[in-house]
Amino acid sequence: MNRYMPLTGHDCTVPALLIDTQAPLDVLHDAAVHRIQAVTQLLENLAFREQLSSDAVVLQDFAHLLAIPLRDGCDLLDAISRRLNANPA
């Protein structure tokens, strides 16, 4: 496995944001949890609102905004999974 893994949410030929796959597992896990919990908290807040009205463009932008940290969190979990599968203890 390469030491630095690009985030998959931003498709480009030269990645600017990378995950250090050799970082301590607890650090990778904490970063993933932080991103996934931020998205979860916001979605839960929206789910409990009595009224939510917005046009399709705003909702599309909002969904994209939430997808970024969620994808980052999944990428971090993927790095953890690869490490654990490569070195079963």
Image (cartoon, rainbow, N blue to C red):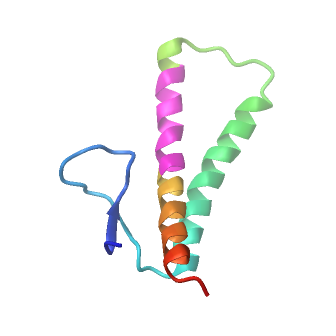
Q: Is residue 39 left or right of residue 83?
A: right
> What residue appears at the point 37 percent right and 55 percent down from the top-left corner?
7
Query: Quarter holding the C terminus?
Result: bottom right
Examine the rendered structure and indicate whether residue 12 appears above or below residue 72. Answer: above
Query: Quarter holding the N terminus?
Result: bottom left
| 61 magenta-colored | yes
Q: Check the image and name the residue furthest to the left.
A: 13
Q: Position of residue 55 (x, y in %)?
A: 54, 12
Magenta highlight: main SS: helix
Q: Position of residue 47 (x, y in %)?
A: 76, 30
> What residue appears at the point 65 percent right and 53 percent down from the top-left corner?
37
Q: Is residue 8 left or right of residue 61?
A: left
> What residue appears at the point 29 percent right and 43 percent down from the top-left corner?
11
> What residue appears at the point 32 percent right and 70 percent down from the top-left corner?
4
Q: Position of residue 30 (x, y in %)?
A: 59, 69
Numbered circles on residues, count? 0
Q: Position of residue 84 (x, y in %)?
A: 55, 76
Examine the rendered structure and indicate whether residue 74 appears above or below residue 63. Answer: below
| 60 magenta-colored | yes
Please identify the quarter of the rendering in which residue 23 is found.
Answer: bottom left
Boundaries of the magenta span: 59-71
